[in-house]
Amino acid sequence: MVTIKSKKEIEVMKEACKVVAIVYQELEKHIKQGISTWELDQIAEKTMRRLGAIPAEKGYDPKIKGVPKFPASICVSINDEVIHGIPSKSRILKDGDIVSIDTVALKQGFNGDAARTFIVGKTTNENQRLVDVTKQAFFEGIKFAKTGFRVGDISHAIGEYVRSQGYSVVREFQGHGIGKEMHEDPGIPNYGKAGRGIRLEAGMTLAIEPMVIQGKQNILELDDGWTIITEDGSMAAHYENTILITEKEPEILTIL
């Protein structure tokens, strides 16, 4: 069921989203060659707790048989890892790495969710383009995140833009509604037909998140039950924000 947030709920949710934005400000200072993904996880958790929030991803239970609860505060996915990478003391960032981080903060009962992709040091023009296209795909999508449009209009805009740039979108994972729960209705695929899906209304809060692959769309899941990689070994990027549907333009809640 899609929930329409009250003015009071929106104000509380904005606080959770602000925490996420501040976490990324802190992480960006430390994403350098030689740091471990575990250290990034610690920085993110300490920042969230200092701001009165808790890392919603830590201990997240997917309720899938055989899949453990997520053990860390953020997801850190590198190069051909698309999403859900588990931070580790042994995973050290190297020059040229593409690092996608997904963060969810829970504060006063509401969630804020965003993802960013960073590049460590210098990289190729093609890898930089992948990151830029992934970010722009989000902004192409939210051109249709307005009252009267449908979820499919957002999905179609993202998918067509990514395709036009010669890349693929992940089809098995998608954006989602967000609020008291990390994942709420509606699901928001990164591909689809315009004019389909539920109609958007003011007060909806959505996490829109293009997940883009340089090569083919096929993905694999690692034995840890979480990490998703590209099947062909090509690079991937991820960009996400929590937005609010208003009577006018959408409001991006996870950007300061």
Image (tube, grey):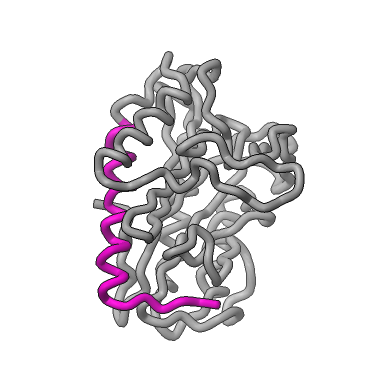
Is residue 25 inside the magenta stretch? Answer: yes
The quadrant in which the N terminus is found is bottom right
In this orientation, which residue lies closer to the viewer: 148 or 134? 148
Q: Can residue 129 be seen in this view?
A: no
Q: Is residue 191 visible?
A: yes
Residue 79 % position (x, y): 57, 30
In this orientation, which residue lies closer to the viewer: 58 or 21? 58
Residue 74 % position (x, y): 47, 38
Q: Left or right: 65 with respect to 35?
A: right
Number of disc labels: 0
Q: In which quarter of the image is residue 194?
A: bottom right
Give the residue displayed 57% in from the left and 81% down from the top: 195
Above or below 137: residue 128:
above
Magenta-tinted stretch: 1-28
Residue 137 % position (x, y): 48, 56
Give the residue displayed 42% in from the left and 53% down from the top: 113
In this orientation, which residue lies closer to the viewer: 147 or 3? 3
Residue 146 % position (x, y): 39, 77
Q: Left or right: 32 with respect to 57?
A: left
Give the residue displayed 49% in from the left and 41% down from the top: 58
Q: Left or right: 126 with respect to 107?
A: right
Give the residue displayed 63% in from the left and 51% down from the top: 62
Above or below 26: residue 19:
below
In this orientation, which residue lies closer to the viewer: 90 or 133? 90
Is residue 210 inside the magenta stretch? Answer: no
Chief secondary structure of the magenta portion:
helix
Q: In which quarter of the image is residue 31?
A: top left
